[in-house]
Image: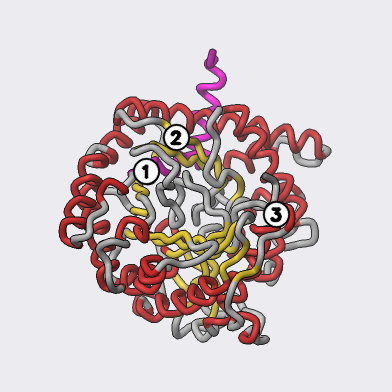
């Protein structure tokens, strides 16, 4: 039973420590919409999403009022569009027209993002996959709420270096297409290794083909709650530190479980997973970097940062899995630069570099996230950075991702303002040495030997 003290404690987390349900994400399968006629396909997609999601926003708001829990975003994820559009789409422009349909229905049901403009190409690309990938710059520059992701590697299949090369070019082109908005399109594009089917967080969410027809996934976040809890054990040993993080993660996950179950009941859609991710925002007191400082670092990026982040990530997962039978998605700690004021401060102070961030991704929840780089960075350099991050995911059997933003017209030392949850960021320097010959080899990097477990 929940006692009065726990109710008061949860209220304090919400009111003073930035605890929130970051997103309720409704996953919708579009496999039954497949049609060889593009107009009929678009019509089926529109009506299926609208019927499934028309009550999503009002349901979230009702739950928020009833329980007093902030639910920041209501979102939709759909089956990777490369699979859905393959029969009807003969050009990148055809695929981009589907993106406009997704954007239209997202506007009409009131969600802030719709994810799943995606392709899964870890071993090879079909013609439809390649057409969708080449359409991404057009799709993201002509829509407002569509998010795109491409999975280019996995522990089982290795890394598709042809896709990695192509994604470097696509990111650069997306930056050019949206340069009037400081290359904002790239903030809605993620490159994955080992992408999960049930991730509720944008921009990487899609509805996996192994999922039910519709599913409710909830993402919870509370960096401020964890930091406040750690302030009470300042100077204590690692055992006390770990126990404190674990207990706090348990409490945060229970809030997500409550919201997920209630949303499932009200929408008559099965409950999928709770994703407990410490996802920061630009708000003061809602920073993963600040947690690392509370653990004992002067700045994120100081010696000891990777160890501190590994500890944090592991204890968050241990606490979360005790609170819900269905913890999934990306659960762990996110380290996006532009969305975390503590990370921004660390970059500005010279404590945090791109290379240190890469080392941190070996142990965190996702990867190189929301990092602004100079607009003149070569496409092959972007591909090389992606390849490094995919290798970390492949070898360590974990999800890794890259969301790089080459800001056209800006260079190191300048800042870029994205606004809202996307925050602002200093432009970070990139290693100037060439990897052109490596990226241009083509083909696949084979899967590591420990992938053969059958």
Which is nearer the N-term, disc 2 or disc 1?
Answer: 1
**Whether residue 198 is situated above or below residue 384 in the rendered picture:** above
Front position in the image: 271 or 283:
271
Front position in the image: 38 or 423:
38
> Could you tell me how many numbered marks the image carries?
3
Front position in the image: 446 or 287:
446
| Mark 1 secondary-structure assignment | strand
Quarter residue 39 falls in: bottom left
Which is nearer the N-term, disc 3 or disc 2?
Answer: 2
Residue at image coords 40%, 66%: 129
Residue identifier under label 1: 27
Residue at image coords 42%, 31%: 271
Residue identifier under label 3: 396
Which is nearer the N-term, disc 1 or disc 3?
Answer: 1
**Whether residue 406 is situated above or below residue 43 in the rendered picture:** below
Residues at marks 2 and 1 touching, judged by CB atoms closer than 8 Å: yes
Residue identifier under label 2: 272
| Stretch of the chain drawn in magenta | 1-28
């Amino acid at each position: 039973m929940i006692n009065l003290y726990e109710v008061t404690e949860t209220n304090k987390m919400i009111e003073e420590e930035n605890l929130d349900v970051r997103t309720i994400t409704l996953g919708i399968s579009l496999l039954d919409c497949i049609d060889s006629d593009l107009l009929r396909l678009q019509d089926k997609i529109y009506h299926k999403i609208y019927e499934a999601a028309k009550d999503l926003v009002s349901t979230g708001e009702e739950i928020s009022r009833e329980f007093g829990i902030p639910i920041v975003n209501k979102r939709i994820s759909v089956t990777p569009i490369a699979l859905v559009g393959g029969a009807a789409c003969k050009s990148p422009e055809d695929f981009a027209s589907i993106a406009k349909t997704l954007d239209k229905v997202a506007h009409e049901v009131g969600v802030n993002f719709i994810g799943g403009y995606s392709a899964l190409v870890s071993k090879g690309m079909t013609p439809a996959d390649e057409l969708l990938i080449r359409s991404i710059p057009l799709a993201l520059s002509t829509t407002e709420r569509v998010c795109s992701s491409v999975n280019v590697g996995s522990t089982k299949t290795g890394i598709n270096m042809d896709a990695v090369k192509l994604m470097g070019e696509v990111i650069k082109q997306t930056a050019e297409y949206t340069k009037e908005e400081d290359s904002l399109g790239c903030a809605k594009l993620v490159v994955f290794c080992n992408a999960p089917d049930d991730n509720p967080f944008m921009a990487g969410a899609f509805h996996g083909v192994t999922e039910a027809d519709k599913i409710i996934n909830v993402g919870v976040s509370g960096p401020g709650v964890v930091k406040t809890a750690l302030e009470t054990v300042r100077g204590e040993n690692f055992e006390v530190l770990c126990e404190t993080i674990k207990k706090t993660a348990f409490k945060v996950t229970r809030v997500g479980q409550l919201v997920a179950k209630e949303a499932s009941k009200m929408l008559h859609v099965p409950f999928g997973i709770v994703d407990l991710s410490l996802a920061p925002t630009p708000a003061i007191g809602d920073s993963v970097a600040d947690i690392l400082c509370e653990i004992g670092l002067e700045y994120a990026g100081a010696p000891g940062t990777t160890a501190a982040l590994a500890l944090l990530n592991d204890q968050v997962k241990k606490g979360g899995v005790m609170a819900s039978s269905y913890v999934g998605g990306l659960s762990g700690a996110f380290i996006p630069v532009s969305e975390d004021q503590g990370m921004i401060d660390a970059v500005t102070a010279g404590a945090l570099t791109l290379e240190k961030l890469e080392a941190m991704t070996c142990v965190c929840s996702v990867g190189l996230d929301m990092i602004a780089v100079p607009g003149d960075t070569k496409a092959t350099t972007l591909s090389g950075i992606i390849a490094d991050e995919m290798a970390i995911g492949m070898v360590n059997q974990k999800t890794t991702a890259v969301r790089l933003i080459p800001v056209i017209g800006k260079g190191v030392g300048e800042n870029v303002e994205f606004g809202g949850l996307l925050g602002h960021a200093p432009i970070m320097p990139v290693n100037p040495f060439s990897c052109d010959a490596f990226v241009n080899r083509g083909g696949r990097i084979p899967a590591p030997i420990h992938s053969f477990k059958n």
